[in-house]
């Protein structure tokens, strides 16, 4: 094991929820859907505990993009759009473009301004002031930073929303299957890691049209934008009048905020396999695993903070 690798006891200690104000960066595929926008605004509105240092645009490829590069560029643009909507343009100066492609293997990083900035910021932190990396997309940027400078695992804690529940029949989850190589780099790096699984856990964190209309509509420009955008995204997926939409990315931010929002445990770190399965080995190093979301309490905190946004 390289000298820079943390011992298991230290890793486990660092995976505890922070009890003080902490520095965070957000790695986000913001144009992919609608949950990243909620997460970004929620993070900025949670400045009683979270100091946002930088925002990284992550690649994605689905019906909203023509390629991973196009997805990253659109996410970069959407980050700026959200920052203008909430009147926090100062964060535009610390918003960086990320990877233009996924990892081609598990040893070569994809160079990007985001990966380079993460390395730089990580090395500026130490054991008394860790950098928390909230990743809510394909984890290419984070994996690339670790490959560029493996020592950063001593300086960061990664909170990743990705992969499915260990009890789910498969691990064919968007953030994971886009770049399995990147997920494997992170899960094998022994970085202090908190996983929020999608299907089977945070898929329960949903909202509905009537809730958004009642609690957010008319509060401010950002809320009106998100009410309309969430309904628009819902209509892509269903014709049902009684739709609900997961806004799961919010939970990755919430993990840092309040013990009551979710339940978690330590488990041996699984291995993301290329066949959309988890590889399980009880002898592997431990990670923190979220297994329950208190949907109502977290949604209440989210709505209270979003309605307080003061836009110009």
Image (cartoon, rainbow, N blue to C red):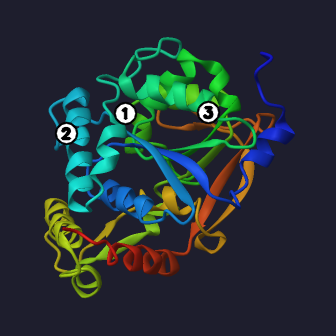
The alpha-carbon separation of the residues under discs 1 and 3 comes to: 15 Å
- Mark 3 or 2, nearer chain start: 2
Mark 1 element type: loop
**Residue appearing at x 41%, y 45% in the figure:** 173
Residue 67, percent across and down?
20, 29
> Which residue does the numbered mark 1 point to in the structure image?
178
> Which residue does the numbered mark 3 point to in the structure image?
187
**Residue 85 visible at all:** yes
The alpha-carbon separation of the residues under discs 2 and 1 comes to: 17 Å
| Mark 3 or 2: the one toward you | 2
**Residue appearing at x 50%, y 58% in the figure:** 253
**Residue appearing at x 66%, y 70% in the figure:** 259
**Residue 200 visible at all:** no
- Residue sitting nearer the eye, 154 or 198: 154
Residue 19, percent across and down?
71, 61
- Mark 2 or 1, nearer chain start: 2
Q: Is residue 277 above or below residue 40?
A: above
Q: Are marks 3 and 2 in contact (CB under 8 Å)?
A: no
The alpha-carbon separation of the residues under discs 3 and 2 comes to: 28 Å
Q: Quadrant of the C terminus?
A: bottom left
- Residue sitting nearer the eye, 152 or 299: 152
- Residue sitting nearer the eye, 188 or 164: 188
> Which residue does the numbered mark 2 point to in the structure image?
74
């Amino acid at each position: 094991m390289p000298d820079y690798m943390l011992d298991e006891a230290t890793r486990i200690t660092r995976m505890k929820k922070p009890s003080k104000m902490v520095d965070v960066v957000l790695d986000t595929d913001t144009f992919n859907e609608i949950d990243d926008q909620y997460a970004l605004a929620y993070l900025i509105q949670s400045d009683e505990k979270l100091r946002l240092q930088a925002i990284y645009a992550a690649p994605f490829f689905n019906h909203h993009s023509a390629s991973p590069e196009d997805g990253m560029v659109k996410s970069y643009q959407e980050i700026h759009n959200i920052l203008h909507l909430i009147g926090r343009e100062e964060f535009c100066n610390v918003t960086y473009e990320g990877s233009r492609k996924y990892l081609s293997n598990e040893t070569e990083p994809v160079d990007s301004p985001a990966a380079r900035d993460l390395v730089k910021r990580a090395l500026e932190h130490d054991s008394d002031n860790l950098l928390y990396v909230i990743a809510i997309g394909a984890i290419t940027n984070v994996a690339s930073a670790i490959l560029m400078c493996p020592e950063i695992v001593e300086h960061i804690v990664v909170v990743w929303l990705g992969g499915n529940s260990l009890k789910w029949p498969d691990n064919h989850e968007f953030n994971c299957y886009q770049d399995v190589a990147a997920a494997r780099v992170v899960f094998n790096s022994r970085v202090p890691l908190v996983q929020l699984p999608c299907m089977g856990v945070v898929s329960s964190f949903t909202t509905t049209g009537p809730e958004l209309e009642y609690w957010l509509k008319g509060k401010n420009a950002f809320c009106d934008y998100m009410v309309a955008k969430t309904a628009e995204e819902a209509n892509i997926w269903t014709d049902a009048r009684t739709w609900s939409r997961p806004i799961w990315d919010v939970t990755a931010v919430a993990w840092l905020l309040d013990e009551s929002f979710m339940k978690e445990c330590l488990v041996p770190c699984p291995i993301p396999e290329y066949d959309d399965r988890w590889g399980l080995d009880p002898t592997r190093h431990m990670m923190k695993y979220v297994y329950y979301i208190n949907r109502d309490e977290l949604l209440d905190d989210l709505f209270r903070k979003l309605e307080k946004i003061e836009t110009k």
